[in-house]
Amino acid sequence: MLNSRVRPLALLICSAFAAIPAVPAGAGPNDALHVYGGVAYGHDDNLLRVPEDQPAFDNTRGDSWWTREAGLIFDKTYSRQRITLVAKLSKTSFDHFKQLDYDGKDLQANWNWQLGNHLEGKIGTSLEQVLAPYTDFASTERNLRRTRSSYAEGAWRFHSAWRVRAGFQRDKYSYEALSNRYNNRTEDASELELDYLARSGSTVGLVARHVKGKYPVPRPVGPFAFNDNFTQDELKARVRWLATGSTTLDALVGYTRRNQPSFGEGRTSGFAGKINATYQPRGKMTYTAAVWRDFAPLESTVVSYTQNTGASVGAQWDATAKISVNADATYERRNYNPRRDFAGSDNLRDAIRTTSLRATWHPRPLLQVQGGVAHQSRSGSVVLGTGSFKSNSVTLTANAQF
């Protein structure tokens, strides 16, 4: 039994070191084009997030998987124009729930442009195909999520201390599972921002944002079908404060108003935002912390959205020039807004806790080996039918660029 558990780690380490001699002498970290290859092993003792008081699918809660990935990475700066391209394909195979086997995709194209000393921006597009999480999806059906994103933004520094920025982004989500097709949607977000740039490097800005969501497939509810289209307007302050040489504070906070009238009034508004803090004293430690409160859509016939309030803390220890260790903990409470009043609708909430620990080793600049463990738990909602679950997982990865 011990040998079977050690075998994945041994295979990964052997694969990593077998790749080292194949690196061409001229392939260095500063080269524009790299060939990418990686292999990963993982095990989760509750892969499908089955509640503790419910029987497991196929009498099996845990499962293991292998992922093999290959692709190309291009990163080149031409004068003031930077072009980055990523094309990665992967294949993931599960030991027990073989119907979940899938081919993953990660395609990206980005252009960071600059004209003169006052105009700059970004244009890009991406396509990602992964297995959607089963946290709120009770099924053994394979549910691939394909995300297509396109964005464009530009900034004009019309004064040494002032900058105006405008941007647009379209995100399109599509799901493979027939039982989840009504969650397909397109979100269009447009932004306009005015920033004050202090000499210290800190910035203060005001951001106006409008989001429009469209659901092409109506949601079936008994004999009826409803459309979950929504609009969301935000007015927030963006602050990047370089408090000291070792402390940085990033904040995006303000007012959000959301309208999703598929059931009932469907309107909500209030304070929302996120604050991140980074503390990096002299030495080998870096500390991070964050708090947030936001509104998020939820694909459900019972509730229309959630109000998420959370906090996270993390630390990174750079043990040596080649080894780093990261520890993170996250807590998020989700308060659900019912589409209509019913018995128990005034007590719709749950919470998700996640902790993780991982170590990363860079034996060479373009070679990385990483191992990690994670624990996740949810306190469920009896009214919503989301039970409490616990999950423990381990992952081992090795990847290299040539």
Image: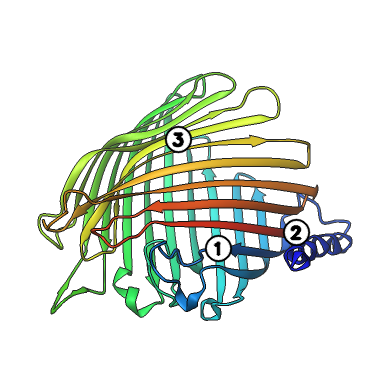
Q: Nearer the viewer, residue 39 or 34?
A: 39
Q: Which mark is residue 400?
A: 2
Q: Position of residue 214 (x, y in %)?
A: 26, 64
Give the residue displayed 61% in from the left and 64% down from the top.
43
**Label 3: few (<14), some (14–19) or many (≥20) C-alpha neighbours in 10 Å:** some
**Label 2: few (<14), some (14–19) or many (≥20) C-alpha neighbours in 10 Å:** many
The amino acid pointed to by label 1 is: Asp
Q: Quadrant of residue 318?
A: top right
Residue 50 appearing in the image: yes
Q: Count the marks: how many?
A: 3
* Residue identified by numbered label 3: 290
Quadrant of image for the N terminus: bottom right
Residue 89 appearing in the image: no
Q: Quadrant of residue 239?
A: top left
The amino acid pointed to by label 2 is: Ala
Q: Position of residue 68 (x, y in %)?
A: 67, 70
**Along the horizontal axis of the image, is 136 left or right of 256?**
right
Q: Are marks 1 and 2 in contact (CB under 8 Å)?
A: no
* Residue identified by numbered label 1: 45
Q: Which mark is residue 115?
A: none
The amino acid pointed to by label 3 is: Ala
Give the residue displayed 63% in from the left and 63% down from the top.
42
Give the residue displayed 67% in from the left and 64% down from the top.
40
Q: Position of residue 139 (x, y in %)?
A: 40, 73
Eye-nearest disc, 1 or 2: 1
Q: Secondary structure at mark 2?
A: strand
Q: Position of residue 189 (x, y in %)?
A: 32, 53
**Label 1: few (<14), some (14–19) or many (≥20) C-alpha neighbours in 10 Å:** some
Give the residue displayed 78% in from the left and 42% down from the top.
322
Quadrant of image for the C terminus: bottom right
Q: Earlier in the sequence, mark 2 or mark 3?
A: 3
